[in-house]
Amino acid sequence: MVAEPQKKFISPDEYLTMEAVSPVKHEYHNGEIFQMAGASLAHFQICSNINSSLNIQLRGKDCRSGQSDLRIKVEETGLFTYPDVVAFCGGAVLLEDGRPDTLLNPSMIVEVLSKSTAEYDRGSKFDHYKTITTLTEYVLVWQDKRRVARYRRQEDGGWSLHDFIGDGADIELSSVGCTLTMDEIYDKVEFEE
């Protein structure tokens, strides 16, 4: 009988120290680190389109958006991750460890779905995100077809879903006072057949 190797527990501080010098991004949860997958051209283009549109619409407003370089920490569950696009309003609340790269108060998170991440993004990752008290909208964007799902936190703490499919939809993002169109989201995106 062969013994399975013991997994070494990594502390959050060890993770943050390693991540600061790592050439690739990793998620962290419960003492384990997970390398994040690379992005396809469609994924890259969709994220760029969304972030560009949000940045233009947020000029002069008290909200900011950014792509996947800004890490967030889900304080309730201990997950550290890099959303595809994140927006926050008011001042940034950052992890109190002298590192200016970990946001605690996102207002809206966008994840672009791929075959390898779709189940996680719609399931357990969303369960983590639901515990962030400042988060009021969660947006899922398909990269293989024109489809967007917008979840919005309700007053009772539940989440409502609005599914947008096809052309011509305007996706209102009340958390940041912006609207995205399908044409903006999917500009220059070539779907694989």
Image (spheres, helix red, strand yellow):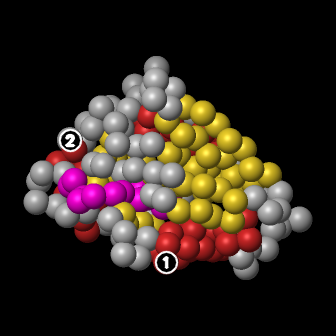
Residue 105 lies, in percent from the top left, at: 30, 49
- Residue denoted by label 2: 11
Magenta range is 82-94
Please report the residue visible at 40 percent of the width from the left and 25 percent of the height from the top.
3
Residue 53 appears at what percent x and percent y? 55, 73
- Amino acid carrying label 1: it is Ile
Q: Quadrant of residue 47?
A: bottom right
In the image, what residue occupies the spot 38% across and 32% down? 131
Q: Which quarter of the figure has residue 142?
A: bottom right
**Residue placed furthest toward the top:** 1
The amino acid type of the residue labelled 2 equals Ser
Q: Which mark is residue 72?
A: none
Q: Earlier in the sequence, mark 2 or mark 1?
A: 2
From the viewer's side, name the closer residue of 137 and 81.
Answer: 137
**Residue 11 magenta-drawn?**
no
- Identify the secondary structure beneath mark 1: helix
State the residue at coordinates (41%, 59%).
87
Is residue 88 within the magenta segment? yes
Viewer-proximal residue, 25 or 132?
Answer: 132
Position of residue 166 in the picture relative to residue 137 (left or right): right
Residue 48 figure quarter: bottom right
Above or below, 71 relative to 117: below
Image location of residue 20, percent across then percent down? 24, 65
Note whether residue 111 is visible.
no
User: For this view, does 42 lie left or right of residue 10?
Assistant: right
| Residue bearing the label numbered 1 | 56
- Determine the residue positioned at 80% across, 63% down: 168
